[in-house]
Every structure is written in C-alpha cells, then in structure tokens.
Amino acid sequence: MAYFGGDGNKDPVPMGILLDLSRKITGEWKNIARCLELSEGTINHISVDQSNNVQEQIYQMLVSWKQSKGQLATYGVLSQALRQASRHDLADAMTPCHQKVAVYPEDAKLFLMIDQNRQEPASDSSKEEAFRSVLVDIARTLRTKDVRWMVFQCPQIPPSDQESIEDAVRLFDEMKRYGILSVERLEDLLGKLKLTESLSLLQDFKRRHDG
C-alpha cells in the first residue's frame, strides 16, 4: 500500500497513515524513533508501557512523535527519518502526490461516512478528513465494554441496530447515520469513560479546527 502525502512534503501526516505504517515497521523501531528525535526517556517509557506488544510500541512511538511535533509532524520529516534509519522502501512510499489517503480494509467503513456526491469547500473536506483520522485512532483504543457502554448512551439508535454493534467502527457508522456523531458528543462520552489519551487527541483536533 502506498502512502500519499496530500499536496506536499509539508503536509502533516494523518493518524490513519501512522497506524498503517506501524504495521510495516518491525523490530528496528527504536532507531527510527531516534531519527525522529524522540528522547531516550520517551523510548524507554514506550518499551516498558507496551512491553508485551511490539506492534503497539511502534504505533505509540509514531503517535508520540506526532503529538510532540504537532503540525511539524510532516511527510517530509517522516520520510527523511525513515531514510536515516535505512528504510528507503517506506520512505519512497511517502512521496507526496495529489491522491487521497489510502486506508486499510478494516477501517474502510469509516471512510464511507462521507457522501461522495456532496460538494464541499476544500477547508471543510480537510477538516472532515482530519476528523476521520481521529476516529480511526479512537476506534483502536476502545475496548468492547467501552463500546457497549457508549451504545447505550445513544438512545437515538434503535434497539435493533444497537444489538448489531460489536466494535467502535460500526458504532461511529451508526452515530453518523442517525446524526449524532460530533466532536462534542464524543468528547462527552470519552470524558465519562476517562479515556484520557483518546480524549486528548479529540481535544487537539478541536483546538486546531475550531479555534
């Protein structure tokens, strides 16, 4: 799968791309982390916090980089770091072009939430793409019991549809379908669940796009 950098090397890398990239990086992630200028303290914390899950270590490393750099966490910076870590194959795939971001199959439903026939201003389209990227990341963090709790907080979804919801991706689809998917609604639900990492990502999105 290719990674598309929007309109240039200065574009920030979406969360969905980092998730897919994490699946292609193996045991050499600490070298990449150092090339991304993450501190040894951060690297050690990730290693200990996710000691039994290498793939999660890799993903958290990329997320930590994006959170620490903000809008400076760009395709160009990531591509350069990958080359420094001798992952030229992945760096070559980061070359920007004017194509939409590729998605991985299990999250494809999230990208169907956009009405392809609706014409929107470029700024709105960019905001909605960023929102979908945040949803992809949040979907990864929610446990089954979190999803079930959130389902029952959405009485707008008919009981017959509630019963078929087994994961966060389906939940977000149904919330979109019934017109109750919004930053504010998710912020409220995640706050009540005390999911601080996901809540932080959502609030960061809100500051960047609604400020």
Image (spheres, rainbow, N blue to C red):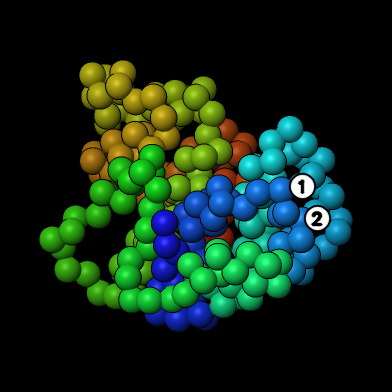
- Residue 180 in which image quadrant: top left
Q: Position of residue 176 (x, y in %)?
A: 28, 44
- Residue 36 in which image quadrant: bottom right
Judge by depth and name the residue closer to the eye, 104 or 123. 104
The quarter of the rendered structure image containing the N terminus is bottom left
Q: Position of residue 87 (x, y in %)?
A: 63, 65
Q: Can you identify the residue that label 2 sits on?
A: 42
- Residue 86 in which image quadrant: bottom right
* Residue under the point 86% across and 59% down: 40
- Are the residues tagged 1 and 2 within 8 Å (C-beta)? yes
User: Which element is circle 1 on?
Assistant: helix
Q: Is residue 53 left or right of residue 142?
A: right
* Residue under the point 55% across and 38% down: 141
Judge by depth and name the residue closer to the eye, 25 or 187. 25
Which label belongs to residue 92? none
Q: Is residue 184 above or below residue 68?
A: above
Q: Is residue 184 visible?
A: no
Find the distance from the CA under tag 1 to the CA under tag 2: 6 Å
Using a 10 Å C-alpha cutoff, classify the residue at mark 1 as few (fewer than 14 neighbours), some (14 to 19) or many (20 or more): many
* Residue under the point 65% across and 72% down: 83
Judge by depth and name the residue closer to the eye, 41 or 185. 41
Q: Is residue 50 visible?
A: yes
Q: Position of residue 20 (x, y in %)?
A: 50, 52
Q: Position of residue 120 (x, y in %)?
A: 22, 69
The three-letter amino acid code for the residue at tag 2 is Thr
Q: Can you identify the residue that label 1 sits on?
A: 46
The three-letter amino acid code for the residue at tag 1 is Ile
User: Which element is circle 2 on?
Assistant: helix
